[in-house]
Amino acid sequence: MNRLRVVAALLLLALGLYLFTQPPPAPKPVIQPVKRAPQYPLSPFEKEVIQLTNLQRTSRGLRPLEVTQPLMNDARAWSDVQASRGRMFHSKMGHGENVAYGQRTPQEVMTAWMNSPGHRRNILNSRYTQIGVGSVNNGRSIYWTQVFE
């Protein structure tokens, strides 16, 4: 009986030493969400304006803007309103906003906006984190809108 107790004690001691001398388990990797491209289609012009806008921002140490469906909807709708009326004007949506018309390419409209202090200020505003872009061609001119939040 004594011998059984000694064997049991030695087994418990050996088990304890084994458990305490094992390295701790490796920490589980933190899984970061993957930023995916928007699940809605962007026209080539919209996509290029967004890329050029984010290039202007990141070249100055600012974070790129995230494209969101609600802002895309607002920008597209406002470009459509302007194109259907054949004139450019600002909305009262409450977003930061840049509008333009007559430029034929994304590069042209970005150059115009960056050469305008107010438009440039919107593009480089560090408080903005999201963007939507619309461009509508009414057959006579392209109407451009950027909205920011």
Image (cartoon, rainbow, N blue to C red):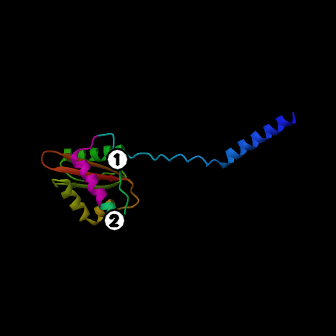
Instruction: Check disc 1 and give the amino acid type.
Output: Leu
- Is 50 in the magenta? yes
Q: Tell me the element at label 1.
A: helix
* Residue 131 vertical placement versus 1 (above, below): below
Instruction: Check disc 2 and give the amino acid type.
Output: Arg
Q: Residue drawn 79% across and 38% down?
A: 7
On residue 83, which mark appears? none
Q: Tell me the element at label 2.
A: loop
Magenta segment's dominant SS is: helix
Spot occupied by residue 21 in the image (x, y as percentages of width and height): 66, 49
What residue span does the magenta drawing correspond to?
A: 41-55
- 13 or 119: nearer the viewer: 13
Q: Earlier in the sequence, mark 2 or mark 1?
A: 2
Q: Residue drawn 80% across and 40% down?
A: 9
On residue 60, which mark appears? 2
Q: Which residue is mark 1?
A: 71
Q: Residue drawn 53% across and 45% down?
A: 28
Q: CA distance from mark 2 to mark 1?
A: 24 Å
